[in-house]
Structures are given as structure tokens and as C-alpha cells.
Image (tube, grey):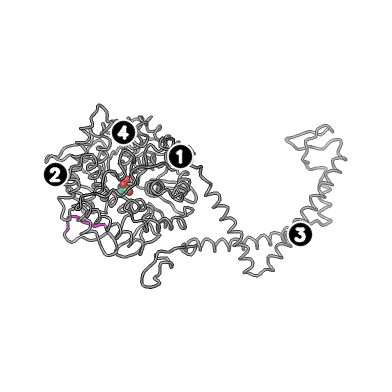
């Protein structure tokens, strides 16, 4: 759906500068509803008053009956000195009865007068209201509404404690000296511009873009919200690439339009890695406070998801009501390991920036709970029930449903400047079990990571699992028993296998999942595993391997992927995923995923940049490729 503000003025569509409530028709509907509700309230109050006046205003007969009953009723009192008997705050009459009766009559009279006066006042007010024109009443309602909105805004934008922005290294152009590499890098930047410009023109404010239909797109991870996921996810890539005008447009939209008080059920994990991660990275890179403020506001909306009997958060939360629940498809109502286990980095930064330990405590509570649990074969199952605290099905994966949990254990250690040895130990233990039970070599000599399902190994690897090559390389330094060489080698082997999965296709783009079974090696077998949706994981691993080895083959492989994406996924309205990487005439899925701008293009750009742009000694990338500074605490103290 295109907002009216996007209509062209002179052939060229302009980004909206000031989208008011009119850009959110569902808001308008809500406001109209509440106006009707208020009018209805006034009317019903008036009817109630008339009704009340009829029954309660004193007439002599009622008065008499009331007086007559006095000797028999229970009078609220606690004075037992006059011979009465106190029964739970009530006095049953005995002696001293006359004096009490006198006081009671006076009190009764006072109350009657007050009720009468109140009713008359309310009647007068209601009459006055009804004398007013519809417009006057509406104006009054609007004023009241504005007051409420202002109050809410004040509450939402509580000033944050002043935390000095640390002096961060590695925010530079990273321009390579080699003209060939520079050209490749420029090509990636041009692709970013194509993706962004089309989103701006056709999908602005929506979460994602349909590049063929040329309109906005969204999925259930964002509920029914229109929170500009692509804008938030792309910001830091724009900044790093020096696309400053585009960055400013994004900032302006976020400042004016990004609103989290929406009645929408979103994925806690996705909102954390894309929105909170994206906003925090944009804040650290640019120093613009608005990003920090928005990140903190949003984090507050995610906190109710942790209100479960165990403190393991629900997968989804309604941003307005705070009600949480889990995905219907997850084993026995479970939460997902890769979802509740991928909050640590962002939440630790939130506690640092706000001075509020609540975020830190939430993620440390999850860690403590996991530490206490038995692990079948030392492996973490993908499913954990947040009500019972028990594992669901014993499936383990380093790809979907498990992946970034392992990644965040390693990165928790890195971001703490290697102080968080507890996280490193959990990572080392987990990786040892994974190597023992999940990692195998195929007949053709390709190292792959399979999936553990109900006691046996499925010899299938997902595109998502390919990120692990980079993770092994990143974790090599500091590994147990000084096995750095071994883990770097393992990273290289995974990178090789994943490159093969690309190379063995017609389009030179990787399938979603590929097998090592029945004579098949690194090839997708089922039709529904042959798609490529602009995912980053293989390129992510190339980049980490490039940083740690400087082996030129990683740049070569990255360039092959760049060309294939440009050739087969580029359409005039942006970039689209393809449904079959083995077909020479592929069909499009018509989605430009926000992670294409956040991750795929960023990793490609970094692959063709100098290492002093965001060096890994100073920055840790969250699972959506949003760079967060490490040692930020000690940097601030320096
Ligand atoms: C991204 O959103 C993140 O990398 C996440 O961890 C899993 N994969 C998608 C992109 O493929």
C-alpha cells in the first residue's frame, strides 16, 4: 500500500518529509472509534444521572423508611465503650443508642446534600455539553487526546543518563588502493543504491519491498506493523558506504515516524537483531541520539515477553498489550534456542547506555537457566518450553533454530574484551559436542555440519549453517587447548563446502539446503530447498576468512557471488530472491529482504575494503551484521 504522501509531484516521487497521523490510516480509524466511544459515554452518563436523580433524590416516604430501619441495621463504627459489640468493624446497637442515632442522622443528611449537589453539578455540565455544537465537542475531545498523547510521549522519552559516546576507531572510508578492488567495491555500492532507491520509491515506510510488483511487503515476523524495517536495517550500511544523503533520509523518517505503540505482534528475536541492533549500530557510528532513544523505547516494549514462569521469553509479543506467545509450529509450545539465545549483545549495550540493569539481568537469567540444564550428548536442543523449563524435541542445529545462540556465546566473550570467560566456556563446550556429533566429511571430502534429529544425524546442511565457517575462524584465537589452527582450518573447510554449494548450481547462487547423501554432494534435492532469498551467510564466512587469512580466493568467491546476484536477482525495481538456482530461467519470489541491505551488501563491501574499516579488534557484529563496539565500558572510562 502506498501512502498519499508518496504521490509524485513532478514525475519524480519524493520521500515524505512529514508523515502525520494521515500516513497511518489504522490510527485514524482508532481515533474515530474513540471519539464515538467518548460521545457514547457522555450520553450514557446523562441517562444514568437522570435515572439516579429519579431514584436517589430524597422524597419523604423514602426518608421515613430509612429512619425506621435504623434500629435494626448495622452501623459502621468501632466504638465499643458504650456497650455495643464490635463485629468486624460494625457496631450492633445496645446502650448509647440515642447519641449514635443522632450522629448518624446528621451524617446521613450531610451525605444526601453532597450527593444532591454532585448530581446537580453533573447534570449542569452534561446540559452545557449538549448545548455545544458537534465541532466544539470534537475540538474538546481533540484537546484531551492531545494531552494524553503528550503525556505518553513524555513518559516514553524519559531522558537517558548522559553516557559519553566513546572515541571509536575504525570509522573511516576503508578505500582500497588496488583499482580493481576499488571498482568491485564501487559495484557493491551501486547495488546498494539500486536496492535503497527502489525501496524509497516504492516501499518507503513499509518493512520490505516487492521489487516486481513495486510495492511494500511484510511478513509475520513484523506482525501487521509498518515499521520501516528496511530503513532501520540499512542505516549502518549506508553510513559505512558514505551514502550520507540516504542515511539522513532514513534518520529523518525514524525521527518523525518510527512509532512502537502499535497493536502488532512481532518476533522478539527479529525485532532485537534488526531494529535494536540496527539502531544501536547507527547510534555508535553517527553519534545521533535519536537512534539510542528509539532503541531504548523499543526495548521497553519487548520486556513483557520475559513474563513467563521461567523467564525464557515468548517468541512473539504484542507491542501494545505486552501479551506474548510462541509460534504454533514449535515443538510442544516451546521457545526457540536461536531466538531467546540471541539477545545478549544488544541487551548488554542497552544496560550500558541506560544505566538500567534490567536488560542485562534478563539475558543473564537465561544463561544461568541453560547452564543448569542437562544436555543430551552435550548438545543444546533447539526447543525449550518457557512454562515448564524443559526441552522440547531433541533436535540440534547449527543452522536455523540454533545458529546464532552459539554465535552470541562467542560474541559475548569478545564484546566483554574476553572477560566473560563463562560465555567462552559455554561456547567451547558446545562446539566440542557439535564437532563430535554433527560435523562429518562427505565421501567426496567436503566437510559439512549436519542436523541431529531424534538420535540420528541428518546429512543435510542449510545455507544458514554456512555462517559457522566465519564463527569458527572468529573463535579460533582463544580456543581451548590452543586449537586456533584447527578452528581456522575448520572455518576454511566450511567456506569451501559452501562455495561448492554455489558452484554446483546453474546460477552460481546457493540453495537453501543441500545434501550429502545417496551419491549427492552439496546439492539440493527437494524442490522446496532450491531457492535463494538474498541470504548473507556464505558471503559472511568469506569475509571473516578474508580478514583472518587474506587468501585472495575469498575475494574471488565474493566477486562471483556479487556478479551472480547482479545478473539473476537484479530487476528494475530492486533485487529479488529466485525460486530455483538450478534453473536457467528462474522465477522470482518478489521480495527484497531487509537483510540483503543490512548484511549481504555490507559483507561484500567490507570484503573489498581495507581491514582498518571496522577492525575486528574493536567491533563485534551482531547476527544481522550490525557492528557494535567492544570494550565500550573501558573505552568510556579512558
Ligand atoms: C538474518 O536475519 C540473520 O543473520 C539471522 O541470524 C538469520 N539469518 C537471517 C538472514 O539469512
Q: CA distance from mark 3 to mark 1?
A: 54 Å
Left or right, residue 284 beside residue 447: right
Q: Residue at x 32, y 46 (%)?
A: 625
Q: Which residues are magenta?
A: 577-583
Asked if the beta carbon under badge 3 is closer than 8 A to the nearest atom of ligand 1, the reply is: no
Q: Which residue is mark 3?
A: 120
In the rendered image, is residue 615 in sight?
yes
Residue located farthest toward the right when viewing the structure as drawn:
98
Q: CA distance from mark 1 to mark 2?
A: 51 Å
> Are discs 4 and 1 less than 8 Å apart at CB?
no
Residue located beneath label 2 in the image: 518
The image quadrant that residue 223 belongs to is bottom left
Q: Position of residue 355 (x, y in %)?
A: 49, 39
Q: Residues within 10 Å of mark 2 (few under 14, many from 20)?
A: few
Q: Give the mark toward the camera: 4 or 1.
A: 1
Residue with the mark numbered 1: 351
Q: Position of residue 260 (x, y in %)?
A: 47, 52
Separation (CA) of disc 3 from disc 2: 88 Å
Q: In terms of sequence position, does the residue under pointer 4 or pointer 1 come before the other?
A: 1
Give the number of the mark in front: 3 or 2: 3
User: Which residue is identified by label 4?
Assistant: 427
Amino acid at each position: 500500500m502506498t501512502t498519499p504522501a508518496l504521490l509524485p509531484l513532478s514525475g519524480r516521487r519524493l520521500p515524505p518529509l512529514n508523515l502525520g497521523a494521515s500516513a497511518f490510516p489504522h490510527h485514524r480509524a482508532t481515533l474515530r472509534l474513540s471519539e464515538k466511544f467518548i460521545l457514547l459515554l457522555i450520553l450514557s452518563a446523562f441517562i444514568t444521572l437522570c435515572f439516579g436523580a429519579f431514584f436517589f433524590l430524597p422524597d419523604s416516604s423514602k426518608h421515613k423508611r430509612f429512619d425506621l430501619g435504623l434500629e435494626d441495621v448495622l452501623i459502621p463504627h468501632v466504638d465499643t465503650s458504650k456497650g455495643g459489640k464490635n463485629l468486624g468493624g460494625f457496631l450492633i446497637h445496645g446502650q448509647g443508642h440515642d447519641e449514635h442515632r443522632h450522629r448518624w442522622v446528621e451524617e446521613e443528611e450531610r451525605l444526601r446534600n453532597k450527593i444532591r449537589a454532585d448530581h446537580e453539578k453533573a447534570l449542569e455540565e452534561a446540559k452545557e455539553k449538549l448545548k455545544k455544537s458537534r465541532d466544539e465537542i470534537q475540538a474538546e475531545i481533540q484537546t484531551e487526546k492531545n494531552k494524553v498523547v503528550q503525556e505518553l510521549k513524555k513518559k516514553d522519552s524519559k531522558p537517558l543518563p548522559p553516557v559519553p559516546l566513546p572515541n571509536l576507531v575504525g570509522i573511516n572510508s576503508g578505500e582500497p588502493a588496488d583499482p580493481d578492488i576499488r571498482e568491485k567495491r564501487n559495484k557493491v555500492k551501486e547495488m546498494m543504491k539500486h536496492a535503497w532507491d527502489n525501496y524509497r520509491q516504492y516501499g518507503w515506510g513499509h518493512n520490505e519491498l516487492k521489487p516486481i510488483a513495486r510495492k511494500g511487503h511484510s511478513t509475520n515476523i513484523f506482525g501487521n506493523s509498518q515499521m520501516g524495517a528496511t530503513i532501520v536495517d540499512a542505516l549502518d550500511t549506508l553510513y559505512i558506504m558514505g551514502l550520507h544523503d540516504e542515511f539522513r533520509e532514513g534518520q529523518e523518517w525514524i525521527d518523525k515516524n518510527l512509532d512502537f505503540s502499535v497493536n502488532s505482534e512481532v518476533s522478539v528475536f527479529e525485532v532485537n537483531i534488526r531494529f535494536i541492533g540496527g539502531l544501536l549500530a547507527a547510534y555508535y557510528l553517527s553519534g545521533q541520539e535519536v537512534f539510542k532513544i528509539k532503541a531504548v523505547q523499543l526495548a521497553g516494549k519487548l520486556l513483557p515477553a520475559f513474563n513467563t514462569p521461567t523467564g525464557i521469553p515468548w517468541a512473539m509479543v504484542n507491542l501494545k498489550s505486552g501479551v506474548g506467545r510462541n509460534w504454533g509450529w514449535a515443538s510442544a509450545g516451546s521457545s526457540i534456542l536461536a531466538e531467546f539465545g540471541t539477545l545478549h549483545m544488544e541487551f548488554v549495550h542497552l544496560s550500558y547506555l541506560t544505566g538500567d540493569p534490567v536488560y542485562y539481568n534478563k539475558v543473564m537469567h537465561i544463561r544461568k537457566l541453560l547452564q543448569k540444564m542437562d544436555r543430551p550428548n552435550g548438545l543444546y536442543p533447539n526447543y525449550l518450553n518457557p512454562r515448564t523449563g524443559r526441552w522440547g524435541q531433541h533436535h540440534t542445529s547449527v543452522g536455523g533454530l540454533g545458529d546464532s545462540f552459539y554465535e552470541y556465546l562467542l560474541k559475548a566473550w569478545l564484546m566483554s574484551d574476553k572477560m566473560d570467560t563463562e560465555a567462552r566456556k559455554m561456547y567451547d563446550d558446545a562446539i566440542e559436542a557439535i564437532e563430535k556429533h554433527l560435523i562429518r566429511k562427505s565421501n567426496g571430502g567436503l566437510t559439512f555440519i549436519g542436523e541431529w534429529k531424534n538420535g540420528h544425524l541428518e546429512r543435510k546442511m542449510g545455507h544458514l549453517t554456512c555462517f559457522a565457517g566465519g564463527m569458527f575462524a572468529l573463535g579460533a584465537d582463544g580456543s581451548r587447548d590452543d586449537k586456533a589452527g584447527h578452528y581456522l582450518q575448520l572455518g576454511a573447510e566450511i567456506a569451501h563446502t559452501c562455495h561448492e554449494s554455489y558452484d554446483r548450481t546453474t546460477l552460481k547462487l546457493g540453495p537453501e539446503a543441500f545434501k550429502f547423501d545417496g551419491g549427492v554432494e552439496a546439492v539440493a534435492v527437494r524442490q522446496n530447498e532450491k531457492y535463494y532469498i538474498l541470504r548473507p551467510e556464505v558471503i559472511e564466512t568469506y569475509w571473516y576468512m578474508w580478514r583472518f587469512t587474506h587468501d585472495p580466493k575469498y575475494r574471488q568467491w565474493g566477486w562471483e557471488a556479487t556478479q551472480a546476484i547482479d545478473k539473476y536477482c537484479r530487476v528494475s525495481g530492486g533485487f529479488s530472491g529466485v525460486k530455483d538456482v538450478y534453473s536457467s530461467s528462474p522465477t522470482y519470489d518478489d521480495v527484497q529482504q531487509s537483510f540483503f541491505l543490512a548484511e549481504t551488501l555490507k559483507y561484500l563491501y567490507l570484503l573489498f575494503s581495507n581491514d582498518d574499516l571496522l577492525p575486528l579488534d574493536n567491533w563485534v557484529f551482531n547476527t544481522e551484521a550490525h557492528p557494535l563496539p567492544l570494550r565500550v565500558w573501558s573505552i568510556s572510562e579512558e
